[in-house]
């Protein structure tokens, strides 16, 4: 062990530094201060996104969500897209393979059909908002499980709170049953206009179902005409 016998403190320090320099060159080793890990509780996280007032903020707060098993298997989180002040929202069930790959809702074949559906009643994709109950793809496109929908749905509710649409169209049985807390069949759910948190809500077939069964296009068209008529009526009444 090296002994330092100089009594002049400056010379002593110099000697120690020279000794270290001989050992390690010009590198100085500074002990890293201990970093305190900031761990947010689940309540804090929920409070944070519940108080959010823009879609952009909400997206950045929830896009890395791992609250259910689908967080581990998704490729991309699919928040939704469209006008943040949309008067009309279209809500499906969950992202599929194309959506999971690109992080955007309804962009595969069913998405192209949805675009045509939207345009057939004189809206554009850009002026409405499109999203799903689930933000992550269930493996092999299986149906969402009840606990997954229960866990994810508060995000959708927050999206609706921010956007404040006048009208919602549910695409398919699963999104309608989930939002309306109902076990009724799609046929029954399509028969009337529902109220969801004070917002008019109608139900029609999911575009993917129309691709599988084109016979449902006619009843879908009837649903869409009613949807557009209700929108026009609400607009004229609000003038
Ligand atoms: S599906 Fe919803 S709750 Fe589940 S991990 Fe994705 S964002 Fe989170």
Image (cartoon, rainbow, N blue to C red):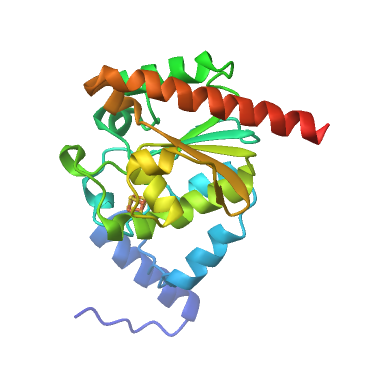
Task: Kindly identify the residue that appears in the image at 61 percent across and 47 percent down.
Answer: 199
Horizontal arrangement in the rendering, residue 83 relative to residue 105 (left or right): right
In the depicted view, which residue is nearer to us: 20 or 197?
A: 197
Image: 223 above or below 192:
above
The image position of residue 133, as x and y in percent, is 40, 46
| Percent of width and height locating residue 207 | 34, 25
Looking at the rendered image, the quarter that the N terminus falls into is bottom left
Residue 77 visible in the picture: no
Residue 39 falls in image quadrant: bottom left
Q: Position of residue 174 (x, y in %)?
A: 33, 45
Near-viewer residue (203 or 44): 203
Query: Which residue lies at the image location 34% right of the left edge and 41% below the top edge?
Result: 186
Can you tell which quarter of the image residue 85 is in? top right
Q: Which part of the image, by quadrant, shows the C terminus?
A: top right
Q: Residue furthest right?
A: 239
Q: Is residue 205 left or right of residue 58?
A: left
Q: Is residue 47 above or below residue 216?
A: below
Question: From the viewer's perspective, is 117 left or right of 96?
Answer: right
Q: Position of residue 57 (x, y in %)?
A: 57, 47
Residue 97 occupies quadrant: top left
Report whether residue 182 is seen.
Answer: yes
Total labels: the figure holds 0
Residue name at image x 30 percent, y 56 percent:
148
């Amino acid at each position: 062990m090296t002994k330092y016998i100089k009594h002049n403190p400056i010379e002593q320090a110099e000697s120690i530094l020279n000794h270290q320099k001989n050992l390690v060159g010009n590198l100085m080793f500074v002990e890293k201060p201990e970093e305190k890990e900031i761990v947010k509780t689940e309540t804090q996280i929920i409070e944070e996104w519940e108080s959010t007032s823009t879609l952009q903020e909400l997206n950045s707060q929830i896009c890395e969500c791992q609250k259910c098993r689908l967080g581990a298997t998704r490729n991309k989180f699919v928040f939704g897209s469209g006008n943040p002040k949309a008067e009309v929202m279209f809500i499906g069930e969950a992202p599929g393979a194309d959506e999971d790959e690109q992080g955007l809702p309804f962009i595969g074949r069913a998405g192209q059909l949805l675009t045509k559906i939207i345009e057939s009643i004189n809206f554009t994709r850009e002026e409405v908002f499109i999203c799903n109950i689930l933000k992550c793809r269930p493996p092999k496109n299986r149906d969402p499980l009840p606990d997954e929908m229960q866990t994810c749905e508060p995000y959708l509710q927050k999206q609706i709170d921010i956007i404040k649409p006048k009208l919602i169209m549910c695409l398919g049985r699963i999104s309608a049953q989930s939002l309306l807390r109902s076990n009724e069949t799609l046929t029954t759910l399509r028969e009337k206009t529902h109220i969801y948190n004070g917002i008019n809500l109608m139900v029609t077939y999911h575009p993917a179902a129309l691709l599988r069964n084109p016979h449902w296009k006619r009843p879908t068209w009837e649903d869409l005409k009613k949807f557009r008529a209700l929108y026009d009526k609400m607009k004229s009444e609000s003038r």
